[in-house]
Image: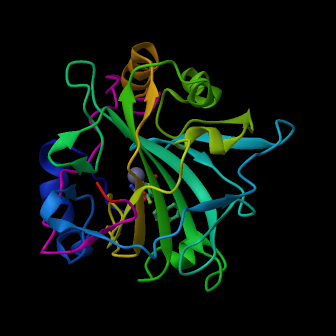
């Protein structure tokens, strides 16, 4: 598809020109402001299955020019949602060294340092993510807010390989690890709403679950993420560092955000 970026002439205010859904309804991310939140006692803890991958298994870590992403096997599943969802990939959004606030979702206007997304597709109804990506009940994405603090050994299981995917279109095989370690300790407190992909083609196909409790990575880990990855390919003369790869909060259009917790 047409190229798009986070700044400049192909930045988010121009996405709609090639990707009309980016100007459609139910866009993500949004700011979780108190007036939108409604406690829903029927929201059960998220259950993950087969997230504890064996280190004998290999996963593909790649740089697609917009983020670093890790491929995930479809036997990793989410239950406790309206359908069964199978994992496809995870990726990150982050800030820059000078502006270390790069999460997509914000909480009452607060932007976190980064945000992890674990993308799943509705495997009750669709055979793979490409068939599910543009369907209203197609995707479920787990969002994990990330703040700077304690070193995080789970994130290091893939951050330590970033130098292998410095440039756009580079990919390497890495040993699999327990993906559950990337999520917060408790999966019972989260924000839930109907939204979209936060990148083109911006399909309104995502059931969002953003956990209330952030996880931490260290300053060193954050800087590795914010300085080691380029959106340009190795062949290009001028390397363009990839950071600030987050979309601004979209109009919540009086959408209700269900929450599984009471203040
Ligand atoms: N923030 S987000 O979770 O909305 C989100 C992204 F931010 C993002 F960058 C990607 S991508 O595939 O790396 C690049 C553009 O699709 C996807 N990719 C998903 C969506 C559609 C699709 C189809 C096949 C494989 C992966 C994806 C995504 F779901
Ligand atoms: Zn994302």
Please name whichever residue, 205 or 38, is drawn nearer the observer in this view of the structure: 38
Residue 196 position within the rendered picture, expressed as x and y whole percent measured from the top left: 33, 69
Check the picture and name the quadrant holding the C terminus. bottom left
Q: At 47% from the left edge and 27% from the top edge, which residue is drawn?
A: 234
- Residue 13 vertical position relative to residue 241 in the rendered view, above or below: below
- Residue 198 vertical position relative to residue 98 in the rendered view, above or below: below
Q: At 77% from the left edge and 45% from the top edge, which residue is drawn?
A: 53
Check the picture and name the quadrant holding the N terminus. bottom left
Tell me if residue 245 is in the magenta stretch: yes
Q: Is residue 95 left or right of residue 93?
A: left
Q: At 43% from the left edge and 78% from the top edge, which residue is drawn?
A: 134
Q: Is residue 157 left or right of residue 143?
A: right
- Residue 11 vertical position relative to residue 24 in the rendered view, above or below: above
Q: At 44% from the left edge and 28% from the top edge, which residue is drawn?
A: 216
- Residue 130 vertical position relative to residue 70 in the rendered view, above or below: below
Residue 64 position within the rendered picture, expressed as x and y whole percent measured from the top left: 47, 45
Residue 101 position within the rendered picture, expressed as x and y whole percent measured from the top left: 25, 32
* Quadrant in which residue 89 is drawn: bottom right
For the record, the magenta segment spans 232-261
Tell me if residue 75 is in the magenta stretch: no
- Which residue of the protein is positioned furthest toward the bottom in this rendering? 125
Magenta part, dominant SS:
loop
Q: Is residue 176 left or right of residue 116?
A: right
């Amino acid at each position: 598809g047409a190229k798009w970026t986070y700044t400049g002439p192909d930045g988010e205010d121009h996405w709609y020109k090639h990707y009309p859904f980016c100007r459609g309804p139910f866009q993500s991310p949004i700011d979780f402001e108190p007036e939108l939140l409604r406690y829903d006692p029927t929201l059960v803890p998220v259950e993950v299955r087969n997230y504890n991958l064996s280190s004998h298994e290999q996963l593909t870590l790649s740089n697609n020019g917009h983020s670093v992403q890790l491929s995930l096997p479809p036997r990793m599943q989410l239950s406790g949602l309206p359908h069964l969802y199978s994992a496809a990939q995870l990726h990150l959004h982050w800030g820059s060294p000078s502006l270390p606030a790069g999460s997509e979702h914000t909480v009452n206007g607060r932007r976190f340092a980064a945000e992890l997304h674990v993308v799943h597709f509705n495997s009750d109804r669709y055979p793979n993510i490409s068939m599910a990506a543009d369907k209203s009940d197609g995707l479920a994405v787990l969002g994990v807010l990330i703040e700077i603090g304690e070193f995080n050994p789970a994130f290091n299981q893939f951050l330590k390989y970033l130098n292998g995917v410095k440039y756009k279109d580079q990919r390497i095989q890495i040993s699999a690890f327990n993906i559950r370690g990337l999520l917060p300790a408790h999966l019972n407190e989260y924000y839930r709403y109907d939204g979209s992909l936060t990148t083109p083609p911006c399909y309104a196909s995502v059931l969002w679950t953003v956990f209330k409790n952030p996880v931490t990575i260290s300053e060193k880990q954050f800087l590795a993420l914010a300085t080691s990855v380029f959106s340009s390919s190795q062949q290009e003369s001028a390397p363009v560092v990839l950071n600030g790869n987050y979309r601004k909060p979209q109009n919540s259009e009086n959408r209700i955000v269900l929450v599984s917790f009471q203040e």
